[in-house]
Amino acid sequence: MAQACLFCRIAAGEIPCHRIHEDEEILAFLDIHPVRPGHALVIPKAHHVWFEEIPEPLGARVFAVSQAVARGLKEIYGVERVGMVFTGIHVPHAHAHLIPMRHQHDVTSEIYLRDGPEAFHLPPQPPAEELAEIAEKLRAKLDL
């Protein structure tokens, strides 16, 4: 456990949370600053700052628990989709946000969150050549 990590302390039971699921490796709990009602977090109990650092078997467990929580969120909130976003921005511990989505842009824009869907505009689309160049660079970096 990273001593100063908020999520490690929550996983260790030092700080209370509204638990949804807990097993030896994973903890799912409600976000205390939800984007939408039901906004949940799924974390590995082991400290990993970035999601790409999570070992594959543990990542698969995070994903499986996230899917189960998402199915419950869909049923409870009557939504068609639940967005899943991995971050580590506010708390440097990899975590998946599960957000019941009422609108297609619920998890895509700070402007949307501030001004609502009427003010949201899609970012400009880069030229196809630029996207092709980025995709080529990424393909060269993959070790799959």
Image (tube, rainbow, N blue to C red):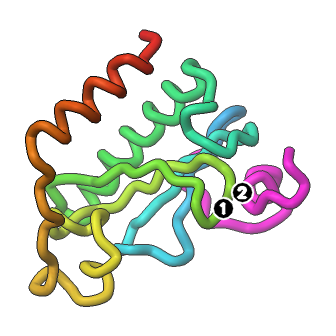
Rendering coords of residue 29 (x, y %): 57, 58
Indicate the amino acid at tag 2: Phe
Which mark sits nearer the N-terminus, 1 or 2? 2
| Left or right relative to 107: residue 91 | right
Quadrant location of residue 44?
top right
Q: Which residue is mark 2?
A: 7
| Left or right relative to 113: residue 131 | left
Rendering coords of residue 109 (x, y %): 29, 71
Instruction: Look at the image and say whether residue 53 sits in the magenta stretch.
Output: no
Label 2 Cα crowd, 10 Å radius (few <14 / some 14-19 / many 20+): many
Indicate the amino acid at tag 1: Val
For the residues marked 1 and 2, what is the alpha-carbon distance in whole angstroms?
Answer: 7 Å
Rendering coords of residue 136 (x, y %): 27, 24
Contact check, label 1 and label 2, Cβ < 8 Å = yes
Q: Is residue 109 above or below residue 97?
A: below
Q: Which residue is mark 1?
A: 91
Label 1 Cα crowd, 10 Å radius (few <14 / some 14-19 / many 20+): few
Q: Residue at left 46%, top 12%?
A: 143
| Span highlighted in magenta in the image | 1-21
The N terminus: image quadrant: top right
Closest to the observer, 121 or 124: 124
Q: Residue furthest bottom?
A: 115
Closest to the observer, 113 or 60: 113
In what element is the residue under mark 2?
helix
- Front label number (1 vs 2): 1
